[in-house]
Image (cartoon, rainbow, N blue to C red):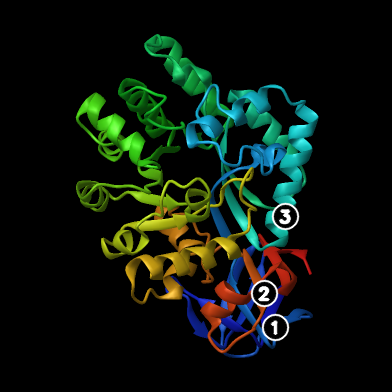
Amino acid sequence: MLVIENGIVLGGMNLNPMKVNIAIENGMIVEISREKISSDHRIDAKGCIVVPGLINAHVHTADSILKDLGDGKSLDEIVKPPMGLKHKMLENTKDKEIIEASRASILEMISAGTTTFIDYREGGIKGIKLLKKALKDLPINSIILGRDPIFLEEDPSTTKLRNRIKKLLRFADGIGPSGFGEITDETAHKIVEECEKWDKIASIHVAESIEAQKLSIEKTGKSEVERAIDAGFHLLIHFTNPLPRDLRLASENNVTIVACPRSNGMLSTGIPPIAKIHDKNINLLLGTDNIMFNAPDMFREMEYTLKVTRALKRGYFHPRDVLKMVTTNIHRFLGKKIGCIAEGFQADLIIVEHLSKNPYLSLINRSQSKNIRYVIIKGRIVKR
């Protein structure tokens, strides 16, 4: 049994600071107590904050082969399938290079305190297999959402489409198509139907740009968000440019949103209205998105998120709510026992030097990879 003692623990779903000791056994948190816990295997966390491991809820690790390419090009020129820069590069890069670059980025995430990531994987089943090879023997928790080129067809055969979705779901944890600029409403509905049958995640990119929203309304009379909710998707990526009705629909339909503020800022598509989303009590996660133009570092994502949100709001936004977006809010979406320091939860946590008197701002404003003393995933120390 491993015991962590003497640190300031941000515990429970509300991340309340507590002076408690934590006992870990068989990969799980088995006891949290103010009393001393007997064990020969212990970590002295004096002068440190003990916080749940960070969750990167939207990342494309294969894009690691494209770092900083395409700067100054439009969103469509860079990432719109099948002719975007990233898709052409992925097609023309050797498998070994993709695996090595992806693995390097995953190791970078671990060193920066990320213990779980959700990857949106291009390339069908082959792309999923490449990621699994990159993940071999690495301790991090991964959730892989696949996609298939058939999704881009104007009028695919229903039987063929369903078969492709089923094949993907044998290898992946769900489906994550690019967006309604590339897929039809019929394809979207079939993706969600099959994911529900398999009890897997159905996610889609929506409202990343104003142009995409306008095109959707011109074409169908509905915003991308309306179409996603009509199809039954419950994990929406970006939500950068929602209409007022979109916010209300998301709130009423138990939707979880993954915002990617640094990515949107880099691509000049706007900043997600995080304060408005929060005020509607919509569950909110954060992701670093494409590694081609963002380091997969959740500390940097949190700091950017907090500061641009306060700037847009022209008022106070609590840093604890930003920290929840990369920790405890994942439990609200998945229902699994991860993302929280509580008895019965998986022991994924990081121990970080306490750099200021405010534990939330110490993490968000001041912490870097070098300030992490320990990364613990499934009860195993993977960095010290």
Q: 167 or 357: nearer the eye?
A: 357
Q: Which residue is mark 3?
A: 108
Q: Which residue is mark 1?
A: 45
Rounded to the nearest angstrom, the CA distance separating label 1 from label 3 is: 23 Å
Rounded to the nearest angstrom, the CA distance separating label 3 from label 2 is: 17 Å
Residue type indicated by callout 2: Ile
N-terminal label among 3 and 2:
3
Asked if residue 310 shows in the view, the reply is yes
Q: Hey, which quadrant is residue 130 in on the image?
A: top right
Neighbours of disc 3 within 10 Å: few (<14), some (14-19), many (20+):
some
Q: Give the image location of residue 199, x and y in percent.
A: 42, 37
Q: Give the image location of residue 255, x and y in percent.
A: 32, 49
Mark 3 or 2: in front is 3
Where is 287 relative to 71, above or below? below
Rounded to the nearest angstrom, the CA distance separating label 2 from label 1 is: 7 Å
Mark 1 or 3: in front is 3
N-terminal label among 2 and 1:
1
